[in-house]
Image (cartoon, rainbow, N blue to C red):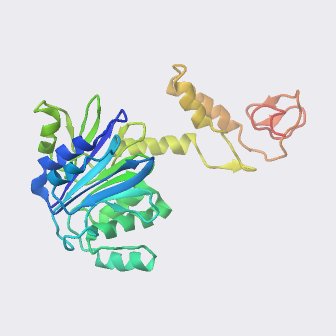
Amino acid sequence: MCGICGVKLYKNANAFEKVCAILEEQKHRGQASTGMAYFAQNRLVISKDIVSPIQFKEKRLSTGGIVIGHNRMPSHGGITLQNSHPFMSCDGKFAFLHNGSEDTSLMKDLMIKLGHKIDGDTDSEVICHAIEEFAKKDGLADAIVKVHESYDRSVFLILTSDGEIYGIGDACYIIRDDEGIYIASEEESFAALFDGKKKNVYNPDGLFRITADNRLLFRDDFEKEKKKIERYHPEKTIKGKSYLGGWWDKRKKKDEQDDWSDEDWDEEFDKMEANKALKKGEFCDCAESEMDFGSGICNRCKKYVEGECGTNE
């Protein structure tokens, strides 16, 4: 049993003290070692030591506003720095924390054969590299879910180099207030942060994600996001150009400027869908011709046009 925590502040304040406060509250979950992952000079870094959470606080790190932290109670591997959390993926794209005890012997052999560098002898480090390997094909979110299906007694917490936090597992609680978002292994671990004030606490069912722009997404939100991306940002191209020409970015910008409804945007999207290469020809160079919006064909030269005529030389 180990303790995990995370803090993401909306302003770029130093979250170190808040992370230490949570780790101290859950020191009964392990004091063999303590560690954090955070950003220094815009780079994802790790600091860990074979000390208790209270001793680690003396480091007084300047962590910035996005931090994940861990206090360890060993179940696999000795009390060494190599076995302490967090762990970094080989490509440096994410730092990983783990709470649980799993048999990863077969997975470790596979990861080593695939070229991953594993320094210690914990199950946690193996799981970190397994997620990295699966993410190459499936993307990080799907990789986390797939690996967790094999190790479902565990809790994973990940901080990415893009400033996002992912987590999965039963023993994981979240509070959100006006200053930021906080994660801990136990609901009681938030006591030092809020002086006993009652807060709404989430215990996510499945994967959750805290985005770089501070959105807190749960499993149902992931499905909605996925459908949006599939509908509004398809990756089909004609001659290297997107069918939609950055339409999704256009929508996001437009949403900030007016009050178009989803129905308005669906109608706009359908119009642009109709402007795909239904009939593939050369791009039109007619400066003054008109396009038939339904077919995407220039009425003058009868060639396919993307958007307005004369813009695709």
Rendering coords of residue 10 (x, y %): 35, 33
Rendering coords of residue 50 (x, y %): 20, 63
Say which quarter of the image contains residue 85.
Answer: bottom left
Say which quarter of the image contains residue 201.
Answer: top left
Rendering coords of residue 56 (x, y %): 20, 53
Image quarter of the C terminus:
top right
Image quarter of the N terminus:
bottom left
Q: Vertically, is 313 above or below 30?
A: above
Q: Nearer the viewer, residue 134 or 115?
A: 115
Q: Give the left or right position of residue 34, taking residue 47 as reference.
A: left
Residue visible at 43% across and 80% down in the picture: 113
Rendering coords of residue 142 (x, y %): 41, 57
Q: Give the left or right position of residue 165, taking residue 242 as reference.
A: left
Residue visible at 44% across and 47% down in the picture: 41
Residue visible at 26% across and 31% down in the picture: 177
Please indicate, yes or no, whether residue 45 appears anywhere in the rendered image: yes
Q: Vertically, is 126 above or below 284?
A: below
